[in-house]
Amino acid sequence: MLTMSGVTKRYGETVALADAHVTFDRGHVHTILGENGSGKSTLVKLLSGVVRPSAGTIRLDDRPIELARPADAQRLGIATVFQEVLLAPARSVLENVFMGYDGLFRYRIDRAERRRRAEAALASVTRNPLDLDRPAGTVPLAQQQLIVLARALVREPRILILDEVTAALDFGDRDVLFEAIRAFVDGGRLALFISHRMDEVRRLSDRVTVLRSGSVVETLETGEITERRLLSLMLPDTHIPVGQHV
C-alpha cells in the first residue's frame, strides 16, 4: 500500500534518515520503534508532508507521490496524530474535531451530521462521553488527545499515523484505542504506530520496523516480535543475561 525506497532526509551536514527502505501493507498495524534520535520523528514528518525528502521515492498504491505539504498527505487519505496535543482551547470540542475539515466559505456537512460523526468518532476511542459544546481547553489532557484522534478519524483516512499518542492516556482509554486501531486496519487500511513502550508494541503490532541512528535496522513479522529481539536491534551493545525475562 505504501513504500519508502531509498528515502533520505538531510539537514545540512546532519543525516536524520538515511536510505530508508520500508514496505507498509494494508490491513496491518506497522510499528516504528527506536530510541530518541533514531529517525522516527523524521519518518513521520516525511509521510505527513511536514518535510520533504532529500532523496528517494515514496509510493502509494505503487504510484510515486509527492508530499510537499500536509494538505498533500490529507488529500491522499493520510491522517497523522502527533504526540503534541494540537487544538484551539477556546473552541468547542465539536469545532476542534472538525477543525480544517470544511471549505473556506461553507460547511461540507450540516451541523446535525457533524455532531453525529463527532460523537461516533469519540465513542470509538473512549468509553467516557465528551460534551461536544464544552471548550476543548477545559477538558483533561488525556481527553484533549482523544479529541485530536477523533479529528483524524472523521476524515475517514486510508492511512492513520499515530505518533506516541498513548502517552497521556490511562489504561482504559488505551485499551479502547487499541480496539479502534484494530477495527481500522481490519477494514483494509493501514495504521503506523510509533511507540517506545514494549508492552504496546508486542500487543498491537503485526509488523515492527526498528530504526537506529537514522537507519532502518530490520523489519520483524508478528512471530519474530519479542522484547529481547527488539532490544537487541535497538541497543545492540546492551547485555541481557541468559534466562532473564525481558
Image: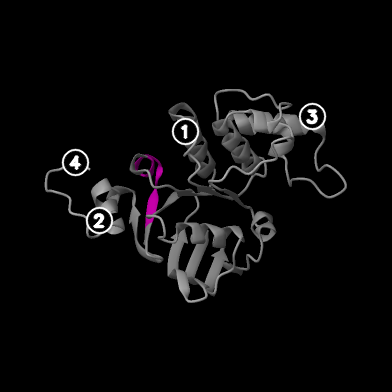
Give the label on residue 232, or none: 2
- Residue found at x 81% / y 43%: 108
Q: Nearer the viewer, mark 3 or mark 1?
A: 1
Residue 28 visible in the displayed image = no
Q: Earlier in the sequence, mark 3 or mark 4?
A: 3
- The residue where tag 1 is placed is 174
Q: Position of residue 202 (x, y in %)?
A: 34, 43
Disc 1 element: helix
Pick whichever of labels 3 and 1 is earlier in the sequence. Answer: 3
Give SS at disc 4: loop
Q: Mark 4 packing: few (<14 Cα in 10 Å), some, or many (20+)?
A: few
Could you say whether the residue bearing mark 2 is in a helix, strand or loop?
A: helix
Q: Which residues are magenta?
A: 200-209
Coordinates of residue 87 in the picture (x, y in percent): 66, 41
Query: Where is mark 4, residue-wise?
Result: 245
Q: Are marks 4 and 2 in contact (CB under 8 Å)?
A: no
Q: Amino acid at mark 2?
A: Ser
Residue 112, which numbered label?
3
Indicate whether 37 appears above or below 90: below
Q: How much space separates mark 3 and mark 1, taking CA atoms?
A: 29 Å
4 and 1 marks in contact (CB < 8 Å): no
